[in-house]
Image (cartoon, helix red, strand yellow):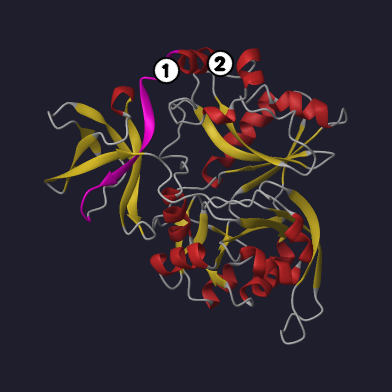
Amino acid sequence: MTDQVPTDTAVETKTTALHALHVELGGRLVEFAGWELPIQYEGVIAEHTACRERAALFDVSHMGVVELRSPDGIDALANALESLTPASIATIGEGRQRYALLTNDRGGVIDDCIVTNRGDHLMVVVNAARRDVDLARLRTGLDGIDVVQRTDVSLLALQGPQAATALTRLCPAVQELVFLDFRQLDVELGTADTAAAGSRIEGVGVSRSGYTGEDGFELLVASERAEALARGLLAQPEVTPAGLGARDTLRLEAGLPLYGHDLDETTSPVEADLVWTMPKRRREDGRFPGADRILAEYAEGPARARVGLRPRGRRPVRDQTPLRTPSGEPAGVVTSGGYGPTVGGPVAMGYVPTELATDGQTLLADVRGSDVEIDVVALPFTPHRYHRGT
């Protein structure tokens, strides 16, 4: 799960606990969803490559962290939340996470989120731009459940094939985690040759997860200790600071949808190729918003489908670019597009009529007055490398 790439806008903004560090490191700060965040430091391609080859550290503290609590326990919480999503919440084991979609009564996606079973409560991480909408939905839809927004914590994402090597020096227990595990662990910030020597942060929430397609971790820490944790991680030789620009190119290459582009309140989970988030038990009980439309599309097939798109040549095809067939018929729209540094060329995702959603189908897009040929391809563009254990 990730947010839209920020754009420069003159509005009053909030800052994360790492703001001073971003400035110190030379981050180019822009406004996004009411927050001032770094879009890049050294450059998007360099930071993207660092994540694919070594490890990159992202500040994702703008994301919303919400706790759900009930005096009736975790089972009551799970059953309640299942009334708002087609995901299976009741089967999330303690210390495990699950990607889920909040749906509306029309079968569209209100938001995508990560749900964690913390033993005595559920934690839901939502997109920054949808925070207020999601909080309202949870508070009105979950009768008798306490919905608490955590504004005192920060969220860091350490991603890449060497992320585990770097974090293990500070917290050896992370070696035991597999994809979508969550634990509260103590982190030792440094060794004898670093300024952070002997400084320990207790009870950091560590999950083996992320939204880049790479192995990695997300770390939930009290905001007052966030900068110390970030400095401890950046002191590791594998780790490079990275901004939201690289986070977006990474998720695009990994074929992961972006809310506000590839997902919105008119798009169903079936159209978005996210039927894997709806297990058989939930499809059979149909006890979630928009079930009539979603289950009909599941049974009969949707009218359109999210697909991978590979523009030929070097020109990226950006979001909202209309697509057409070689004969000139409308053929959908690009919803995410840009340059894929690992792929070495332009990549995109979009929605096309189901009959055109076949590998090798050729479509056309108008890019600055010239036709660009685009091939429909399977997702992802780069393979996922999550650590699932042996």
> Circle 1 sits in a helix, a strand or a loop, which is it?
loop
Please indicate whether residue 121 sits to the left or right of residue 112 in the image. Answer: right
How far across and down, in percent of the image, does residue 341 sit?
37, 60
Which residue does the numbered mark 1 point to in the structure image? 301
Q: Is residue 66 visible?
A: yes
The local secondary structure at tag 2 comes to helix
Vertical relation: 306 (above or below) 316: above
Q: Residue at x 55, y 66 (%)?
A: 56
Which residue is label 2 attached to? 291
Q: Nearer the viewer, residue 347 or 218?
A: 347
Q: Based on the picture, tell me whether residue 309 belongs to the magenta stretch.
A: yes
Residue type of the residue flagged with mark 2: Ala
* The N terminus, quarter of image: top right
Dot 1 amino acid type: Gly
Mark nearer the viewer, 1 or 2? 1
The residue at the point 42 percent across, 51 percent down is: 253
Towards the viewer: 128 or 206: 206
Give the magenta part as a residue range. 300-314
Badge 1 or badge 2: first in the primary sequence: 2
Front-most of residues 361 and 224? 361
- Does residue 270 belong to the magenta stretch? no
Q: Quadrant of residue 322?
A: top left
The image position of residue 173, as x and y in percent, is 79, 61
The image position of residue 251, as x and y in percent, is: 47, 50
Q: Position of residue 277 (x, y in %)?
A: 58, 30
Is residue 11 at least partly visible in the picture?
no
